[in-house]
Amino acid sequence: MKWHPILAAAEPEPGVWVLIDAQGNEYGRVAVVRLNGDVRFRAEFRGELLGYGASLRGACERVHHEFIRSHGPAPFQGYPDFRPTRPTRPNPPELR
């Protein structure tokens, strides 16, 4: 079984999950809500609304992704390009 952000969630009350970091601090919250008659999962990161998910799993992933992203430079610059480049060679000395 692989680790998943939902494993970092505790349910202190029915329908509300808090995501907890390694130091025991809450960094996110997911709550089951009704939105236009549909069941949705409200995702928050540090008190800021991220959006509404159709599944608990997806909402926890969204909160956790924001948590991971908060540890690096913002905005995300993308991954470095490690493809090999053509080496540049100095011009050979002229023969005399």
Image (cartoon, grey):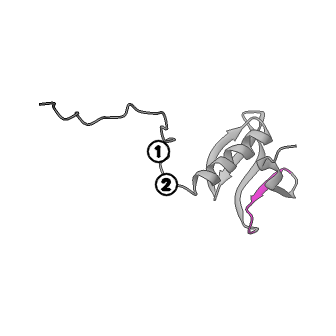
**Of residues 37 and 53, the one drawn nearer to the viewer in this rendering:** 53
Secondary structure at numbered mark 2: loop
**Residue 91 position (above or below residue 76):** above
**Residue 83 position (above or below residue 26):** above
Report the span colored magenta.
Answer: 15-23
Which quarter of the picture shows residue 37? Answer: top right
Left or right: 24 as drawn, with respect to 66: right
Point out the image quarter for the C terminus.
top left
3D distance between C-alphas at marks 1 and 2: 8 Å
Q: Position of residue 13 (x, y in %)?
A: 86, 58
**Of residues 55 and 96, the one drawn nearer to the viewer in this rendering:** 96
Secondary structure at numbered mark 1: loop
Q: Residue at x 76, y 68 (%)?
A: 24
Please, what is the three-letter code of the amino acid marked with disc 1?
Gln
Q: Position of residue 7 (x, y in %)?
A: 83, 51
Q: Residue at x 67, y 44 (%)?
A: 62
Please, what is the three-letter code of the amino acid marked with disc 2?
Pro
User: Of all residues shown, which one is farthest toward the bottom?
Assistant: 23
Q: Which mark is residue 77?
A: 1
* The stretch drawn in magenta includes residue 62: no
Q: Which mark is residue 73?
A: 2
Q: Which mark is residue 57?
A: none
How busy is the neighbourhood of tag 1: few (under 14 within 10 Å), some, or many (20 plus)?
A: few
Q: Are marks 1 and 2 in contact (CB under 8 Å)?
A: yes
* The stretch drawn in magenta includes residue 16: yes
Left or right: 46 as drawn, with respect to 38: left
Q: Position of residue 84 (x, y in %)?
A: 46, 33
**Of residues 2 and 19, the one drawn nearer to the viewer in this rendering:** 2
Q: Position of residue 39 (x, y in %)?
A: 79, 36
How busy is the neighbourhood of tag 2: few (under 14 within 10 Å), some, or many (20 plus)?
A: few
**Residue 70 position (above or below residue 61):** below
